[in-house]
Image (cartoon, helix red, strand yellow):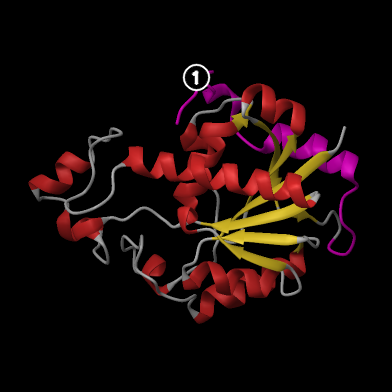
Amino acid sequence: MTGYRLKLIRHGITQGNLDGKYIGVTDIPLCSEGAQELYEKMERNDYGTVQKVFLSPLKRCKETAAILYPEAIITEIPELTEMDFGDFENKKAEDIMNTPEYKKFLKGGLDNPPPNGESMRTVVERCVSAMEKIVSSMFQEGMTNCAVITHGGIIMNLLSCFGLPKYNPNSLVCDFGEGYEVMITASMWQRSTAFEILGRFPYVYDDGSEPLSEEDINGFYYNEAVDTSSADGEDNM
C-alpha cells in the first residue's frame, strides 16, 4: 500500500519571536537571524526534497519555504494561518500579565478566546479543514512526499487531532525550522481519519557529513520524538 510522507515544519524566527511577543496573524517576515539559522540548519541536517509545500499564507512561512524547498510546488492554505490573538497581538506577556483579560485567557479552554481574537475551537476546526485539503490533494495528485510549513500552534493541533500514537500536546512543541514527519495511508485515513507520527524532523547527520540510514532514522526518532511517559492516550484536539 502506498505511504504518503508529510513533513510538518515550523517557520523560521521573526523579530517578534525574538522580542517575546504574541505574533499570530500579524504578517511579519523572517528576521536576518531567522533566515541565517535556517541555512545553518540545512548544513547540519537533511531536509531532503519534497514535491509540494502546503503553507500558511503569512510571510514568515513563505520565506521559510523559499529557503528550505525553493524548487517545490507551493500551495497556500489559509486555514494553516496562526491563531488570531486579537488584542494581545504584538504584545509581550509581561506587559499584559496583570490584566483580567489575560488572566482569563490563561485558564484555557476551547471557547475562551483572547479579546477580539480567535477561540481554540475555531483553530481546531481550521486545522481539520486544512488537513482534509492536504490529504485530498496528495491522494488525487499521487504526491507521496510533501511538506507543510506553518506555525508551532498549528502543528501541535494537527498532531493532536490526527496523530497516532496519542501524546500529551505539550510534548509536541518544536523549534523554529523543525517539526515532525508523519505517514499517511489511504486505509488508515479512511478508517480512522488519522496518520502515524514517525518522529522529529529534519533528519540529523551522524558524523557531520552523511545522513543516517532510513532504518536508523525510524528507530532513533520513534524513541526520541516525544516523552512517552507523558502520553495520556486521549484524543486531545
Q: Quadrant of residue 226?
A: top right
- Of the residues shown, which amino acid type is indicated by label 1? Glu
Find residue 26 and report its horizontal and vertical position in percent.
Answer: 34, 68
Q: Is residue 113 magenta?
A: no
Instruction: List x then y, in percent, for residue 59.
Output: 48, 73
Name above or below for residue 60 compared with residue 88: below
Stretch in magenta:
208-237
The residue at 54%/67% (across/down) is 61
Residue at image location 56% in from the left, 37% down from the top? 159
From this viewpoint, which residue is outermost toward the front?
A: 140
Quarter of the image with the N terminus is top right
Q: Residue furthest top?
A: 233
Going by the image, does 196 lie left or right of 216? left
Residue furthest left in the image: 100
Residue 143 seen in this snapshot:
no
Q: How many marks can you see?
A: 1
Give the labeled residue for mark 1: 234
The residue that appears at 66% across and 44% down in the rendered structure is 135
Q: Is residue 32 left or right of residue 114?
A: right
Q: In the image, what residue occupies the spot 73% across and 54% down? A: 146
Quarter of the image with the C terminus in it: top left
